[in-house]
Amino acid sequence: MPFPFVYVCDLLDKIEGICVREVPLLQRDRVSQTKDSLISWFITHRWRINAQDTNSKSVLMILKPERQTDREYGVEEYLEQILARIFKMPTPMYEKLKQRRDEAHNNGDLGLRLCQIMREMNITPYSATASKISVEEIDQSLLRIAIFNDGSSLAVKSLKEQNENPPDRIEVLEKLYTRLQPREAKWLTRIIIKNYGPVTLPDSFPLPGNVTHLPHSLSATFQFPPEPPTPERRTGTRVKKGIMRKDSARLSLTPPTSSPILPPPEVAPKPASRYRIGWDPQSSTLSAPVKVIAPLTAATFSPIQISSAPKAGQTFQKLASPPTSSLPATSRIHPAPPQTNALPKRNALGQISSNIPSGSQSQQSQPRSQEKNSTASSSRRNSQSRLHPKPTTASPVSFSTGKCLLTQKRCQFSSALFILSPCLLSNPYLLTKLIPYHGAHHLKNLTSLSHPTVPRRSKSGRRVKKFILVDITRPDQTVQFCKQAERAIRKLGWKNKNGNPEHIPIFDWRVLESFAKLDRGVELEFDPVRKHFQGTI
């Protein structure tokens, strides 16, 4: 089986207890106890590391994350915001998480502060769930993030599949963090930052002999890899290795220096000279004959001067766009010879008007038809205004197009009405991107629910779906707003199609983000409705 990540955390916790003490040890004793802990750990888990289904390189490199110089994750700067969003931290907890920068005694250890906050929030999954996470799963998840980062090496970026889209880094990390206990989350955070803080592992240490009667015949020393190994991406039973610089140079098309002189490449013949196809303005107005002019050559000026613009009403045949170079001075434009059998010019408007029968009957029927058309259009406009009232400048509702811009299929939130909590009004990402992308409308004030411009039915005649969006990271404001919304809606007396009081579901605003990924074709490993649903009023 793959190597469990819990065993790595056990070793790191033991070494941290040696390095971090109220009464610090001497350096000689600290180094000696660290080596003894490493030797005992490797002897205990030797059979797991040597197993066929264990990636021993990942196990060794996760103990020395600072040597993984070929990977750049690009999340170190805003890892605090990612962790606050994954664990849905309230604002006081998030402020406490950011205070770790001011702590000088532990060098601003983000992993240690996260461990403390998780214990205060009672975020402790079952130990059986945490033991299922392997070192290989963590390594492949972080490698998947590093593949799409510009700071990673060419060998790492070569593992990208064809037409593969970059993953959502928050979802990848959320899948790992939500299955870890606080102490495992602490070490995962330190692995991402590539800094174990006070824990330092030696680069090499001597190994004891297994044969007792030959203690000094052959000395063995364990040494961590000085450079990161060739990255490998595992997808099921398929293993793809990254292309290093030496391999890429070997695959280049440049011949070696010892190769014979190659013949010069064949030069393709030059194409024939192009001709300009133009329109002769002196020809008949009924047809635009095509005429070939002299071939183009380089010239410093053009002898063609446009004396007058075409007359109004003339329609010309759309021709190919001419080249930008001008004609030579020796070329002239000669008018086309007159057509002997050309038809005489005739006024199209006069012929059309002559074909219309004159009389009082046609003149009397025209106002009757206009009256019928005007009454039909006015009734149609009135019916549309009843179904979906036009937004006015004084409308409290922020209307959108009513069509989802993310998918051509039916969207769950198109033409829906969102009632926003006051704490979401300062979220520009929600107001300017998520809600308009889904083609939904939103209302910012509960007192405006009785306004006549609040849509009750869509253009198709269906009832407009209504949702309440809140921010669950602010529980006090959310509970207070939901109570106010319940009183306001009960006062209006809205009914459903069965005549019963209408119930409006409450969602966390991140449900729009999850459905946006579904509309783009991203497969989620969770049900977004179940995850973000908070209740109904």
Image (spheres, rainbow, N blue to C red):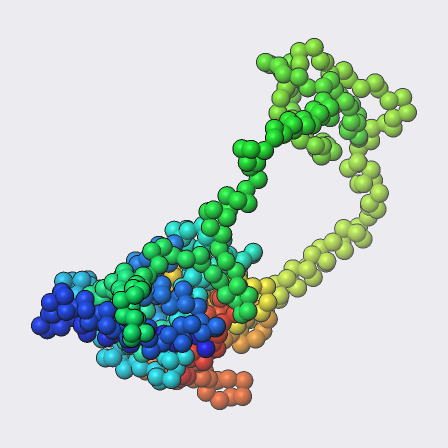
Quadrant housing the C terminus: bottom left
Q: Position of residue 486 (x, y in %)?
A: 36, 83
Q: Please state which of residues 316 and 88 is positioned toward the viewer in this rendering.
A: 88
| Residue positioned most to the left | 23
Q: Residue at x 89, y 21 (%)?
A: 340
Residue 245 higher or lower than 535, as above or below: above
Q: Tell me which residue sits at (45%, 58%) in the image.
A: 231
Count of numbered tags: 0
**Furthest residue toward right:** 341
x then y, percent, for residue 263: 65, 27
- Residue 220 is left or right of residue 528, and the answer is left
Task: In the rendered view, tell whether residue 244 sits above or below residue 426.
Answer: above
Residue found farthest to the top = 330
Depth check: give the residue in front, 286 or 384: 286
Residue 496 spot, x, y in % from top left: 50, 84
The image quadrant where one finds the N terminus is bottom left
Q: Quadrant of residue 115?
A: bottom left
For residue 209, what is the image quadrant?
bottom left
Give residue 507's position: percent from left, percent from top: 41, 76
Q: Quadrant of residue 14?
A: bottom left
**Does residue 458 appear left or right of residue 372 in this picture?**
left
Question: Who's the residue at 37% across and 74% down the image?
Answer: 46
**Residue positioned 76% across, 15% down in the render:** 334
494 or 469: nearer the viewer: 469
From where the camera sits, is residue 8 visible?
A: no
Q: Nearer the viewer, residue 494 or 365?
A: 494
**Is residue 261 at least partly visible in the picture?**
yes
**Is 257 situated above or below 367?**
above
320 left or right of 217 in image = right
